Image: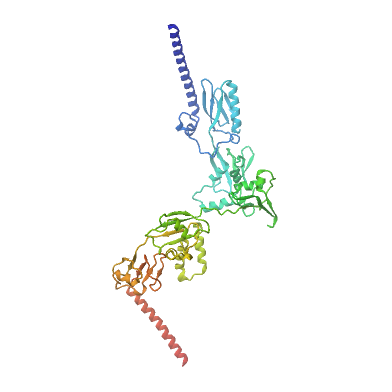
Amino acid sequence: MKIDRLLSMWLTLFSGICLALGFATGAGQTKKTTASDMELFSDKDKLVGAPSSLTALRGPALESTISPDNYFVGPSDGFSVNIWTSPPLAFQLLVTPEGSLIVPTVGEIRVSDMTLAAAKKKVLEEINKRYLRGGASVTLVAPRPILVTVRGLVLAEGTYTMAAYNRVNRAIDEANKLNPMFSAEYLEVLRRRMSTRRITVRHKDGTQSRVDVPKFLATKDDRWNPYLREGDIIIVPQNDFGKNVIGVYGAVNAPGRYEYAEGDSVKDAIRIAYGFGPKAETDSIEFSRQDREGDIVVRRIISGRAIMAGTEPDFPLQPGDRLLVRGGIDRRGDYRVAVSGEVVYPGTYPITRNSTHLVDIIRAAGGFTELASLTSAEVQRQSVAPWDIEMERLESLRGGVAPDDSSYYYLETNLRIRKEVVNADFVKLFAQGDSSQNILLQDEDLINVPPRKKTIYVFGQVVSPGHVPFSPGQDVWYYVNKAGGLTERSRRGDVKVVKAKTRQWLSPEETAVDEGDYVWIPKVPERPFGYYLGIVAQSAVVVSAAVSIVLLIIQMNK
């Protein structure tokens, strides 16, 4: 038993040593082969192909995985070839400038100008002829750089270095990059004139492809925007967007005017407009067609749902055809108002369209606090959307305002555009019960209830400008006297009351002084001696002219 046990221990130890030596030898062979092959790669490609560290794995930014059926292999493509033998073999290989992949122990395999799927199949077939057992894998790990030429209506015609995984539209974008010679406005005009649906790609083998970028973006069909190949010549023609167009309007996700391309159908047009919107009435699409004179010769209702589903036949479109997709009415929305200031629960409150009143929201906000100033509370409304402000300002100047009033009118217009005040008297509504002030609220209204100031601010030409305690029923001069009275250089006849709520400047005869108002006392202007001398000179000219006219009249009457 001892001899058997000792023999078993020796056998186990011997097997372990052999296995260790075998793995070490295999690893050394693999490392040697890999290092030799990796010398063919650039530093970046080594990072892409080297499996030694996850932190070293780094690849290019891709819009999607590369399609093996549409990617064409060419010189400088980098492949990882793994043969699962004992020991396993791993090779990092480049396609040679002659278009071959040289696999150690297998041989030279022609792969250039083949699709990636066909090239992988051919390499695997050759490997399987040499290695009858085990499996193998062939993977593209470093797509090659290529040279392509862009011609036609682009910002900068020329030859560009691209990656083989780039599509045609990327090369056109590269040719349309801004440079100091052109402005962004010029590029925008050029983009409106260039065709995006009738682009031609001429390949070095004499074949050519038509590129339709909008259709590719809508369908993701690779044939409308293929991968680039070395030697490709891309030709971008001009398009006449006044005539060579179709229109898709209404309840689609991207309504608008689109360039027409030969072979377009109803289904294509709807796809290019990114499909129906959620409110589209897809069974009642209005189709219209014009003759060469621009007169409507066909107008009928078609079922977009049936055409898209294939239960009704699709039909080709012509330039000038239009599709109108009607959408159902849906007025649901997040209608809301905001309440700020002296209420118990300030915040945002939902409202019902055309049925929620001011009292309803104040009640929902818990009512006013004891510090609320009803005289200064207001409802603000912005009727003009932010993107329409400039147009509203321009349209407001069409009324023929007199030159003397133009500056004031411009100021008032700006205030109106930025903050319209809804005429609602909070004192009459909440203190006196006047229901005529209970206005209907609209979406995005702002209810602001400021705190009570309990003072009147007197400033300008008084001895002690500042806040004076408010006393109900008192007039302007009461607060002026409380502020120390007028100074010697004050203009007593031009005293103004600035209302706290509206910031309107009114004379003391036009308004009572309410809590929080301001009292302004202007100053007699100080003018230099030359100012008065100029007035005297102008007066002398006027008197001299008048005397001359009188003398002339006297002479004529003699």
The location of residue 52, given as percent across then percent down, is 46, 28
Residue 114 spot, x, y in % from top left: 61, 33
Look at the picture and state if 113 lies above or below 438.
above
Compared to residue 326, the image places residue 488 above or below, namely below
Q: Residue furthest front?
A: 433
Viewport quadrant of the N terminus: top left
Q: Is residue 102 above or below residue 246?
A: above
Is 60 drawn above or below residue 36 in the view shown?
A: below
Q: Residue at x 39, y 74 (%)?
A: 509
Residue 340 left/right relative to 93: left
Please identify the residue farthest to the right as the structure is shown.
297
Q: Would you say residue 431 is visible in this rendering?
A: yes
The picture quadrant where one finds residue 478 is: bottom left
Q: How is the image coloured?
A: rainbow
Residue 259 visible? The answer is no
Is residue 519 rendered to the left or right of residue 268? Answer: left
From this viewpoint, which residue is outermost toward the bottom? 558
**Residue lying at 41% horizontally and 86% vertically, measured from the top left:** 547
Q: Quadrant of residue 136?
A: top right
Asked whether 177 or 460 is in front, the reply is 460
- Percent x, y for residue 268? 64, 46
User: In x, y percent, where is residue 406?
Assistant: 46, 68
Q: Nearer the viewer, residue 268 or 164?
A: 268
Q: Is residue 327 left or right of residue 472?
A: right
